[in-house]
Image (cartoon, rainbow, N blue to C red):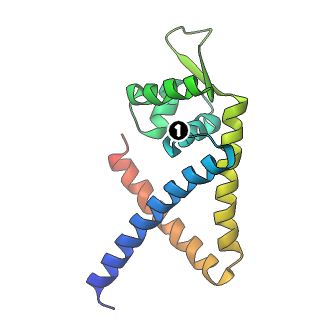
Amino acid sequence: MKKKESREIINRLFVDVFNDILQLEENFIHDKLHDRVTITEVHVMEKIQLSEKKSMGSVAKQLMITEGTLTTSINRLVQKGYIEKRRDDNDKRVYLLSITKSGLEILDIHSKFHEMMVEEVINNPSIGDNLVQSLVHLQDFFKGLKKIYGK
């Protein structure tokens, strides 16, 4: 296979796999809960859950978005009952975020989707090792780009 063809195939696969995962995650959650939540909202909740400091500023920084952009998502998630937002007792300028029981249910379903993907790789050892090595290499590449472009 020529280098140009390989590049085109790899590019198409990256884009297709990325888009498929996002759409299927969203549909999987909707199918399980019969509730419409965007995958962006799920990933915001996931970042809140994983964040040590659950402030708007900290979560926005981790997501590499502005606090204003995050505020839009947070307001929708509060309205849907998936997260709670309250002022910090020590600094009234800071809002702290927490996941509600309904939000945790969504994150649990999201986690199950990821477990299915991982199981598929683990159950196919012929691709598992090579895929892990390739993903580690790709992650290192993205970390380098993040230092340059991850504001």
- Amino acid on which disc 1 is placed: Glu
Quadrant location of the N terminus? bottom left
Residue drawn where x is 64% and y is 49% of the image:
110
Between 8 and 138, the residue placed more toward the observer is: 8
Residue drawn where x is 40% and y is 56% of the image:
144
Above or below for 77 versus 93: below
- Residue 3 point in image, percent of width and height: 29, 85
Is label 1 in a helix, a strand or a loop?
Answer: helix
- Residue 5 point in image, percent of width and height: 30, 84
- Left or right? Give the position of 38 relative to 99: left
Residue drawn where x is 55% and y is 9% of the image:
91
**The residue positioned farthest toward the left in the image shown:** 4
Examine the image and state in which quarter residue 114 appears. Answer: bottom right
- Residue 4 point in image, percent of width and height: 26, 82
- Residue 116 point in image, percent of width and height: 68, 63
- Left or right? Give the position of 65 relative to 133: left
**The residue positioned farthest toward the bottom in the image shown:** 1
Q: Check disc 1: other Cα within 10 Å, few if <14, some if 14-19, many if 20+.
A: some
Report which residue position mark 1 lands on: 41
Examine the image and state in which quarter residue 97 appears. Answer: top right
Residue drawn where x is 64% and y is 43% of the image:
34
Between 26 and 13, the residue placed more toward the observer is: 26
Q: How many discs appear?
A: 1
- Left or right? Give the position of 80 relative to 67: right
Quadrant location of the C terminus? top left
Above or below for 144 versus 102: below
